[in-house]
Image: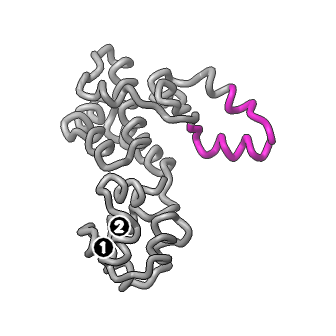
Amino acid sequence: MLKIKNYLEEHNISLYKLAKDANVPYPTVFNIVNGKVSIENCAYKVVAKISKTLDIPLEKLVDMCDQNYHFYVFRSEQIHQVNRKGSLQYLIDTLKNDTIRHLWNDSQKIEALYTLATIDYISRKNNLPKCDNYNDIRNHKLADVLYPIDLEIDSALRKNNESKQKLLKACVPEYLSFNIAEEDYL
């Protein structure tokens, strides 16, 4: 689901109310919120009206509506951060900034679960206890297994799931507990 749709639901804002308050035609709001049209193709005035009505900075609104935003970009950024900072510094920074809670509260559930799995994995690899600040989040998991994009492409091209099955056997348990297929990269 698009982040903007989550945001509207969490704030009890109907599409009709948003359209009326922003003075934007309902079909336009409907198409933006449901990912039928890219917000980047909308007129600036339309996007600015929605941004102002929701009291969300324009840049954030575009990110929330961008159907091309993928978890895979986030995943790649996290792996680079771990490699650049080192796993322990990544762990310290993530816990100090309460990144997981911020992601969770910002309706970025997949990103929060991935980050939590990373923290739990780093903790295990370094014989550290799990941070219990996120036990409520640990009770959640994705409905379906989320595989790396290159594996999805490989499976589609080969028209079989052999590579997915192989990865599942080698998955890091902390990720798999949230239905995220991730191999050891530390």
Q: Is residue 90 magenta?
A: no
Q: Which of 92 and 1 is in front in this view?
A: 1
* Relative to 113, residue 21 above or below: below
Residue under circle 2? 61
Residue drawn at x 27%, y 39% is: 101
| Mark 2, secondary structure of its residue | helix
Q: In which quarter of the image is residue 90?
A: top left
Q: Nearer the viewer, residue 149 or 186?
A: 149
| Mark 1, secondary structure of its residue | helix
Q: In the image, which residues are magenta?
A: 146-165
**With 56 as the anchor, is 61 left or right in this view?**
right
Residue that lies at the very extreme toward the left in this rendered image:
96
Q: Badge 2: how crowded within 10 Å, few (<14), some, or many (20+)?
A: many
Q: In which quarter of the image is residue 54?
A: bottom left
Residue under circle 1? 51
* 2 and 1 marks in contact (CB < 8 Å): yes
Check disc 2 and give the amino acid type.
Leu
Q: Is residue 149 magenta?
A: yes
Residue drawn at x 63%, y 44% is: 150
**Which x, y percent locates residue 159?**
80, 41
Q: Which quadrant: the C terminus?
A: top left
Principal SS element in the magenta part?
helix
Q: Nearer the viewer, residue 5 or 96?
A: 5
* Relative to 6, residue 163 above or below: above
Check disc 1 and give the amino acid type.
Ser
**Which x, y percent locates residue 170?**
59, 22
Residue drawn at x 38%, y 75% is: 19
**Which x, y percent locates residue 7?**
35, 56
Numbered mark located on residue 153 in the image:
none
